[in-house]
Image (tube, rainbow, N blue to C red):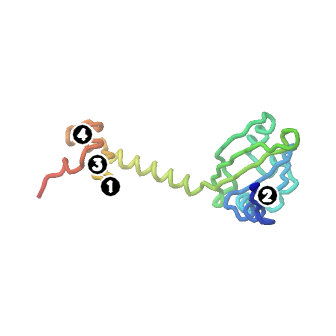
Amino acid sequence: AKLREPVAPAGARDAVIEGMRDGIIVLDTETRIVDVNPAARRMLGPQGDDALGRSAEEVLSGWSFVSDNLRSGTESQRETRVGEGDSARDVEVNVSLLYGRGRRVSGLLLVVRDITRRKRAETELRMLVHALKSTSECVVVADANDEVVFVNDAFARTYGYEKHELIGRPSNLFWSPR
């Protein structure tokens, strides 16, 4: 028996693209925007509402790397910002080449992911790590197995250890029973 390739229901691809959280922007070889999904429109703000047919440089100001990809025939991944002020968002942009007949480049596909929450969490984490490292109070952090995964300089200095001597050791070695 000959196996048949599965066939997606009519409109399934459009439903997926239209319902994605990631923004999808399609550019032609002149870097004109020929398609934008709703997520990309939201991320671009007012610029996204009338983006179709406009040049990427006009709509995506500051994204010169997009034109560079088309000229060089390369793909890339970049982090950048969209919007201004309180509505500014950090985004990750994956640029892929689109191919037409004869394997000629026919445009670009931009997949835009909002990474604002992640960037804020990374900033907060850096601040917390700095605070833990620089406090004069002794700090030791153990994992779920009660093994030391972090000690600050104050702890190592107070107890006369090098930090590398403490990492991986059971944390109960440092506490006296009451």
What amino acid does circle 2 point to?
Answer: Val
Label 4 Cα neighbours within 10 Å, binned few <14 / some 14-19 / many ≥20:
few
Q: Label 1 is placed on what type of residue?
A: Ala
Determine the residue located farthest toward the left in the rendered image. 178
How packed mark 1 is, by other alpha carbons closer than 10 Å (few <14, some 14-19, many 20 or more), is few
Question: What amino acid is labelled 4 in the image?
Answer: Arg
Q: How many marks?
A: 4
Residue lying farthest to the front in this orientation: 1
Q: What element carries label 2?
A: strand
- The amino acid type of the residue labelled 3 equals Glu
**Residue corresponding to mark 3:** 147
- Could you say which disc has been placed on residue 157 in the image? 4
Task: Reply above or below: 143 against 167.
Answer: below
Give whichever of discs 1 and 4 has the lower sequence position.
Answer: 1
Sequence-wise, the earlier of marks 2 and 1 is: 2
Q: What's the CA distance linking mark 1 and mark 4?
A: 25 Å
Distance of mark 3 from mark 2, alpha carbons? 50 Å
Quadrant housing residue 15: bottom right
Q: Name the residue under label 2.
A: 36
Q: Residue 93 carries which label?
A: none
**Residue contact between numbered discs 4 and 3, judged by CB atoms under 8 Å:** no
Horizontal side of 163 relative to 13 (left or right) equals left
Marks 4 and 1: in contact by CB < 8 Å?
A: no
Side of 80 where 161 appears, left or right: left
